[in-house]
């Protein structure tokens, strides 16, 4: 899936007065995906997901591409662990956390200037 730069959503209106509305089914599915641990949609709020749908004319692959671009640009991915029942019977929500992503590729350098194989990061 191609990465898309994160758009400026400050001008996107998500209320009853806006002309374009997010597709209700697509938005509900994206919000449902936020409950899946580690899903890319956990990197945006529900309001941001709605605004992304409006911005990209309800094109979900482009919304996912923008989310991937956001993750790549910030260098980490948000994880929202599932809530669980504690021993006392109360629902406990562990804190969200950011996990760095690996953006550099390790390559083998076989150049003439470097007769020994060296690991180099681009």
Image: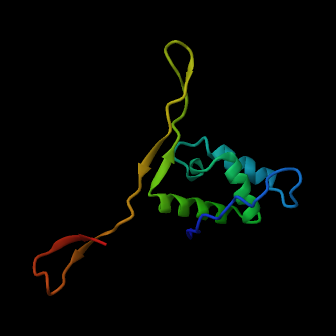
Give the left or right position of residue 80, taking residue 62 as reference: left
| Residue 42 place in picture, x, y as percent | 57, 47
Query: What number of labels is visible?
Result: 0
Q: Quadrant of the C terminus?
A: bottom left
Colour setting = rainbow
For this orientation, the residue located farthest to the bottom is 112
State which quarter of the image contains the N terminus.
Answer: bottom right
Residue sitting at the far left: 115
Q: Is residue 72 left or right of residue 103?
A: right
Q: What is the residue that sits farthest to the front in this orientation?
A: 10
Tell me if residue 6 comes above or below residue 85 in the rendering: below
Quarter of the image holding residue 26? bottom right
Along the line of sight, the residue nearer the viewer: 114 or 48: 48
**Residue beneath the point at 80% across and 55% down:** 23
Q: At x 83% / y 50%, what residue is drawn?
A: 15
Residue 16, x across and y down, in percent: 88, 50
Which residue is pictured at 70% across the width and 58% down the height?
10
Residue 70: quadrant of the picture:
bottom right
Q: Position of residue 37 (x, y in %)?
A: 53, 42
Residue 104: where, in percent of width, then height? 35, 66
């Amino acid at each position: 899936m191609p990465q898309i730069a994160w758009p400026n959503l400050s001008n996107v209106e998500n209320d009853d007065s806006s002309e374009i509305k997010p597709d209700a089914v697509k938005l509900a599915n994206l919000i449902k995906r936020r409950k899946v641990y580690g899903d890319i949609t956990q990197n945006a709020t529900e309001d941001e997901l709605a605004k992304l749908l409006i911005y990209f004319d309800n094109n979900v692959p482009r919304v996912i591409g923008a989310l991937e671009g956001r993750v790549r640009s910030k260098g980490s991915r948000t994880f929202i662990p599932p809530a669980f029942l504690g021993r006392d019977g109360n629902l406990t929500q562990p804190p969200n956390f950011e996990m760095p992503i690996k953006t550099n590729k390790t390559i083998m350098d076989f150049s003439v200037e470097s007769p020994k194989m060296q690991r180099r990061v681009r």
